[in-house]
Structure formats: structure tokens, C-alpha cells
Amino acid sequence: MLAIVNGKVYTITNGIIEEGVVLIEGGKIKAVGKDVEIPPGTEIIDAKGKVVTPGLIDAHSHLAVFGEPSVWANSDGNEMSDPVTAQIRGIDSLNPQDPAIPDVVAGGVTCVYTGPGSANIIGGTGFAMKLRGRTAEEMVIPGTEGMKMALGENPKRVYGEMQKRCPTTRMANAAVLREALVKAKNYLDKCEKAAQKAANGEEAAPPDRDLKLEALAKVLKREMKARIHAHRADDIMTAIRVLEEFNIDYVIEHCTEGFMIADILAEKKVKATVGPLLMSRSKMEIINTTLKNPGILARAGVKVAIQCDTSSGTKWLALHAGLAVREGMCPEEALKAITINPAEILGLDHRLGSLEPGKDADVVIWSGHPFCTMTVAEKVFIDGQLAHERKDVCQYSCH
């Protein structure tokens, strides 16, 4: 058993506890509070003068799929052979030994969603994973898979400009997406009719197994979310238009011009992973990028998770949130945007994202407030196990 005592505990869901206690047993949080009884023999960590938070969560990264160093040999995140590759599974590109992982843990991040990039209209499945373990099976959290989709410049650049084939326009982007979903719906209908006939004792001839359509069928049955890349406001609305046609559960990825239509997104109860916030205007669709975006969206009522959209750069997740605060986002909402909100988007809020009894013991002890540039993660625990420790701490900190 382990007790972290005397720290300033940000529970996320139940306020801040000064000189609080977080009691850990068997990889789970056993108790959180001011006057927690600590059993004899418990290991004690004195966090006096420190800040204690849940482990941070990035709901949109490419960690350990786009490997580091960033060279051709490690570039395994975009299968640019067909605009629809729903059968691709990001887990098959996951490298648990990627050197970027310890860097990210050192930044206080304990869980990420990672997977394919945005070269394709439909790119395959991503997943959430804990940042400890030797194999994909030890790291990946089952049931968190999402289907990567993309609109905007990337697919039409890869296929239209580079390969001189469809899609070459935004119209074609949407058409390719619709066509794939219609094919999957037809396949699903045939499978269900065959299953019904078999249940009735009738002769049934199900369609030949098709991995691409089988994967999309899970999206149509709302067993898997669509994670759709869209920067421009019109692309965001196209994503919503197409996915609502098929009654698909979705998350808008990036949502760069979301601030222009924040009221519409809030009315539709859209969930968005917003970012990366530290990016240059490298292409036309992000020309209106602004650090004010997550704050505007959150104030409008949109469920916002701040994301880094990178590999080792995920270690700066807390600083991305701090920049959002500098540009008007409520500090409490910014902290939620890297803890409980991404946990909810990933369907993991029953396990992660806050310091509550029964949840996974993913806990970070910080030298100061995590939004401060001088703050470091002194100790990071994943499932109650020490995953990172830093002893050469800057003498300056802010709370």
C-alpha cells in the first residue's frame, strides 16, 4: 500500500484538497481526502509543497505508431495505397519500445489514444493505451478502438495531387466516405438477414467475409466511434452531415475553426479533441488557427479535450493547456480538457481522469502547477507502479 500525503490534490471531479491524502492499493485508488486513515506499514510519500493530479490523457496522438526517430523506417501510420483502409489496425504498427514513450511519461502523461494518420478518407482503427508494458497486449485498453476518418486537404493531396486519382476535391472526399458507408450498410444487412434465416432454421448464405466492411459495420452499429479529422468549419459541418446520415457516434478531431460555429457544435453535443495548439500555418485549412479556440468552444458548452497530435511532443500536453488558459480558457476547464474530458471521450471515465476511490492509480506528483513552464513531473505512477521519477528538480516553481 502507498500513501501520498500533504500535497495539494486536484481531484478534478471533487475539488481541490489542501494537504490531502491519496491512498493506493493493488493498482487502484483506495481513498482520497483530508483525513484518510493510513494503515500501519504503508509506504509514505510526502508531497508537501507539491501538486498531485491524475495522470494526464491525450485523446489524439500518434505515439509509437509514427515511430521515432521520424524516418522512413519508422513511418507506419499512413497506409497510402487506397483512400479507404478500414481494415487496417493501428495496433499492428504499435512499437512498445518506441523511445518517445518515456519522454511522454516524464511529461505526466499516463494514457494516450493513438493510431493511423489522416492520409486516407478512412484510415483504420486507433486505440487507447497505458504507457507501460512490453507488448501491445499489455498496453492497449480493449474496447477503446475508434475508426480514423479524414476530410479536408490531406486525402485530396495524397490521392489527387500526388497519385492523380480520386479524391481530388472536398466533394469527392465526402462521396468516398458515403460510398464506403453504404457498402458497409449493405454488407451488414446481408449478414443480419443470413443470421436471422439461420436462427429460424432456414438455409442461409452469408456474404463472404470482408475485413474492410466488417470493421465499418462496427461503426454503423455504434460499437465503435468515428474519429474524424476536420480543421475548416465547412469540413467540420460536412463530417457532421455525413455521419448523422448514418446515425454514427463521432468525435471531431482538431476542430481548428470550431470557434466559428461553436454554438452549432454545442447544440449538437459534439465532442472534440482540439489541437495541436502549437502549430504553424503550414497549410491553408489551418490558416485561422488560434489559441483561443478551446476556450471559446468550452464556454459554448462543447466537450473539449486538448490534444498534441504528435509522438514525443505529447510530453508538452500540460503546457498546451496552460497556453489555452493564457488565451482565455478557464483553468479548471483546461485541466479537465487533459484529464476527465478525454477519459469521457474514450469511454474510460469510470477508470481514468480523476482521483476517486476505485479508479486506476494513475497519479502524478508535480513540483508546482502543471501549467507552469518551470514545473516538472517529479513522480509518475501508472496502475500504482512508479513509471517515472525525476530528482533534479528546478528550485523555482509556481502553484
Image (cartoon, helix red, strand yellow):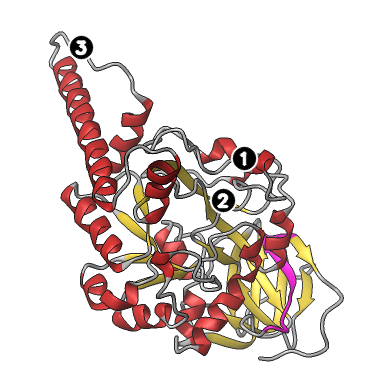
Residue 129 circle label:
2
Residue linked to disc 1: 136
Is residue 323 toward the left or the right of residue 373 in the image?
A: left
Let me know if residue 343 appears in the view: yes
What residue would you read off at disc 3? 205
Tell which residue pokes out farthest to the right in this image.
Answer: 392
Residue type for callout 3: Ala
Provide the residue span drawn in magenta: 373-386
Q: Position of residue 265 (x, y in %)?
A: 26, 70
| Mark closest to the chain's N terminus, 2 or 3 | 2
Q: Residues within 10 Å of mark 2 (few under 14, many from 20)?
A: many
Q: In the rendered image, is residue 361 in sight? A: no
Q: CA distance from mark 2 to mark 1?
A: 8 Å
Of helix, strand and loop, which one carries label 1? helix
Examine the rendered structure and indicate whether residue 393 appears above or below residue 231. Answer: below
Which residue is rendered at x = 41% and y = 43% of the image?
120
